[in-house]
Structures are given as structure tokens and as C-alpha cells.
Image: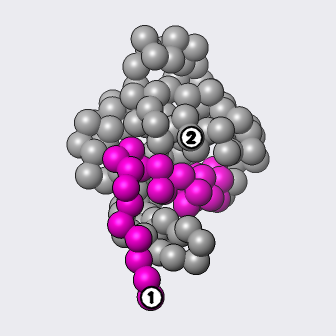
């Protein structure tokens, strides 16, 4: 099997696989709408664009970048978080959000990017699902 080795530094290769995984985990937890997607900016904005629910983003966990993701929204709206397992800062932010509300599902998945029939280097991602309150 031929593999391609990236060429991007922002996890863009994983967008299709992450989108499919988030959709699957969200649907397994609730039939309600996903309203906010949190995580690293470039990954979350790309994935949010492709998700069926078209959620807002909480990019880089920053109220400055995402002022609509205020404290009330983060406590009550449907929220999914996606973090590359190697991103310690993202995982710390996930844990901080999880302290304030129950996590319905949390999974660590190995995602493999695919392009034109070629597989890229697999990487691990953590997805946390927090259903609307």
C-alpha cells in the first residue's frame, strides 16, 4: 500500500475522518443538534464546515476568537470537542470543560487520512460529546 506523508501542519488531512467520527459519536449519544464544536482552530473550523448540523466553533478554546461561545452556551448547548491526542493543551481544555458538565461519550480513535485511494499516517484523536442540557 502506498502512503502519503502529509504536507500540512494543521491536521487538515484528518478533516474527513474526524467529521465522520464526530457525526457517528454525536448520533450515538443524542438525536439533538450539535451546536458547538471545540478544539484547535484550523481543525474545528474545517470540520464544522462539513458537519451536517453546521455548528458554531469554539476555536482554540478562546472567547476572543469565538465570542458566541460564552459561559452559558458552553454549559448548556450541545458540544463536541475534538483533540489530537498529542495536543496536551487541547486535552487540558477538554478536561476543564468536562469539570462543569457531564460527558455523554468520550472516545480515543485512530484516524487515517485517505486521498485518491492512498492512506496517510494514522494519528489518535480524542472526541468528547456533551449533550444539550
Q: Is residue 97 left or right of residue 25?
A: left
Please tell me which of labels 2 and 1 falls first in the chain: 1
Q: Quadrant of the C terminus?
A: top right
Per the image, is 2 magenta?
A: yes
Residue 8 or residue 69, whichever sits in front: 8
Q: Is residue 103 visible?
A: no
Tag 1 secondary structure? loop
Q: Check disc 1 and report the residue beneath it.
A: 1
Task: Check disc 2 and report the residue beneath it.
Answer: 46
Q: Are marks 2 and 1 in contact (CB under 8 Å)?
A: no
| Residue drawn at the location 50% of the way across and 26% of the way down | 58
Coordinates of residue 105 in the picture (x, y in percent): 51, 52
Rendered residue at 43%/83% (across/down) = 2
Q: Residue at x 47, y 75 (%)?
A: 119
In which quadrant will I find the N terminus? bottom left
How many marks overall? 2
Q: Secondary structure at mark 2?
A: helix
Give the vertical position of 14 relative to 98 (above or below): below
Q: Compared to 71, does 96 lie above or below?
A: below
Quarter of the image where one finds residue 64: top left
Which is more foreground, mark 2 or mark 1? Answer: 1
Label 2: how many residues lie within 10 Å, few (<14), some (14-19) or many (20+)?
A: some
Numbered range of the magenta stretch: 1-26
Residue in the image at 66% along x and 33% along y: 55
Front residue of 119/49: it is 119
Amino acid at each position: 500500500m502506498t502512503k502519503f506523508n502529509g504536507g500540512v501542519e494543521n491536521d487538515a488531512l484528518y478533516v474527513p475522518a474526524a467529521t465522520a467520527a464526530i457525526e457517528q459519536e454525536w448520533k450515538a449519544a443524542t438525536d439533538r443538534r450539535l451546536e458547538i464544536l471545540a478544539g484547535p482552530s484550523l481543525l474545528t473550523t474545517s470540520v464544522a464546515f462539513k458537519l451536517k448540523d453546521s455548528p458554531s466553533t469554539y476555536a482554540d478554546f478562546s472567547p476572543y476568537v469565538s465570542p458566541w461561545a460564552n459561559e452559558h452556551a458552553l454549559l448548556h448547548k450541545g458540544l463536541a470537542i475534538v483533540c489530537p491526542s498529542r495536543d496536551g493543551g487541547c486535552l487540558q481544555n477538554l478536561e476543564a470543560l468536562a469539570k462543569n458538565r457531564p460527558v455523554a461519550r468520550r472516545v480515543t480513535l485512530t484516524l487515517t487520512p485517505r486521498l485518491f485511494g492512498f492512506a496517510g499516517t494514522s494519528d489518535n484523536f480524542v472526541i468528547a460529546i456533551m449533550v444539550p442540557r
